[in-house]
Image (spheres, helix red, strand yellow):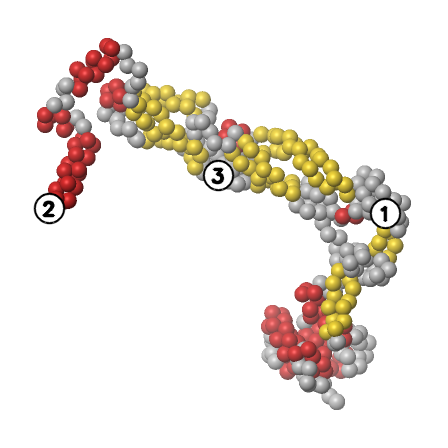
Amino acid sequence: MSKRDYYEVLGVQRDASEEDLKKAYRRCAMKHHPDRNPDDPEALARFKECKEAYEVLSDGGKRRMYDQHGHAAFEHGMGGGNAGPGFHDVGDIFGDIFGNIFGGGTRQAPRRGADVGYVMELDLEEAVAGIEKKIELPTLSACTVCSGSGSEDGKIETCSTCHGRGQVRMQRGIFAMQQPCPHCGGRGQSIVNPCKACHGNGRVQDEKTLAVKVPAGVDSGDRIRLAGEGEAGPAGAPPGDLYVEIRVRPHELFERDGDDLHCEVPIRISQAALGDSVRVPTLGGEAEIRVPAETQTGKVFRLRDKGVKSVRSRGPGDLYCKVVVETPVNLTAEQRELLEKFETTFVGEGARKHSPRSSTFLDGVKGFWDRMVS
């Protein structure tokens, strides 16, 4: 029986791309899978035909030979026979197509150790300037007795369950599934004499101290990755990583917003009314702002480049100072008398020009009540 053209089998043009071939192959294989066609005795043959066509056309060298010589290119030395190029048994077909679903195919690499998370709290000054801090954390470390191998004497033999493949096959009729070997965990090897200290696991509970270098400008939510400082992997497998998450404590003066800082600066009534020079704090010391006469509470002054230079920015942000007019307390008799005398000057219509916000508020209240009673 003559073979069909491979391009015809997959239903693609002769100039089909690798992606087109892959999509066509999956579509063809799923359509003719024997489990989906239990009443069709020809399904397995068509299923194998799809696999054979894809194996040739997905390989650049084989595809060129096929385009030049057709099926004759593989009649000698390339696998031959009805099974097509490279086939050994039906299980190989299933393993290739569904290996990524059921874990089949090749021996699994040793499972790496788990990643570890750690929350580091910093003061704002530490986060802005950068710091090196030592941390202590519980972890699983490589066993020092067996050097992480899990073996008492270093003797390791091929796993008797999977025979070194790292996989075991479960057969349900014609449908085969592969999964990691439960005895060796997919490594394909087993320990003859397990280490007594770690019971063959290659790792033990431990607590270690690390010095973490925190770069200048970090903020809450930033993470620092320390490769290989997580938990050790089982039986000599690679370790995981350590992720240090930064959390900046609230500051008594400043509130951070990205690269900018915000703070409130209290001033006296006289300073707000008459104007004054006021010293304000910055992370680098002190600075001075000029408060003009008749400044109202809530006025914001901007100090350029007095903010934070984060790990992602080229330059520092700004410092925004909001002045808050503070009501005096614990007045002396003289101060109270002066204020009472000062208050008597705010009488009649002339008082409106001295308190523009109060006048606007009172006008708004009057308009509100007029609308309510009308």
The residue type indicated by label 1 comes to Pro
| Residue nearest the observer in this picture, 6 or 268 | 268
Residue at (13% x, 25% y) in the render: 351
Task: Give the spatial CA distance, label 3 vs label 1.
Answer: 53 Å
Name the residue that disc number 2 marks: 374
Binning the other alpha carbons within 10 Å of mark 2 as few (below 14), some (14 to 19) or many (20 upward) gives few
Residue at (64% x, 32% y) in the render: 135
Name the residue that disc number 3 marks: 313
The residue type indicated by label 3 comes to Ser
Q: Is residue 167 visible?
A: yes
The first of marks 2 and 1 along the sequence is 1
Relative vertical location of residue 75 with respect to residue 283 in this rendering, above or below: below
Q: How many marks?
A: 3
Residue at (77% x, 41% y) in the render: 204
Q: Quadrant of residue 48?
A: bottom right
| Residue nearest the observer in this picture, 70 or 273 | 273
The first of marks 3 and 1 along the sequence is 1
Residue at (34% x, 24% y) in the render: 266
Q: Quadrant of residue 336?
A: top left
Secondary structure, mark 2, is: loop
Q: Position of residue 246 (x, y in %)?
A: 55, 37
Q: Nearer the viewer, mark 2 or mark 1?
A: 2
Q: Are marks 3 and 1 in contact (CB under 8 Å)?
A: no
- Disc assigned to residue 194: 1
Q: Position of residue 353 (x, y in %)?
A: 14, 28
Q: Position of residue 104 (x, y in %)?
A: 73, 65
Quarter the N terminus occupies: bottom right
Relative vertical location of residue 2 with respect to residue 308 in this rendering, above or below: below
- Disc assigned to residue 170: none
Binning the other alpha carbons within 10 Å of mark 3 as few (below 14), some (14 to 19) or many (20 upward) gives few
The residue type indicated by label 2 comes to Ser
Q: Residue furthest front?
A: 373
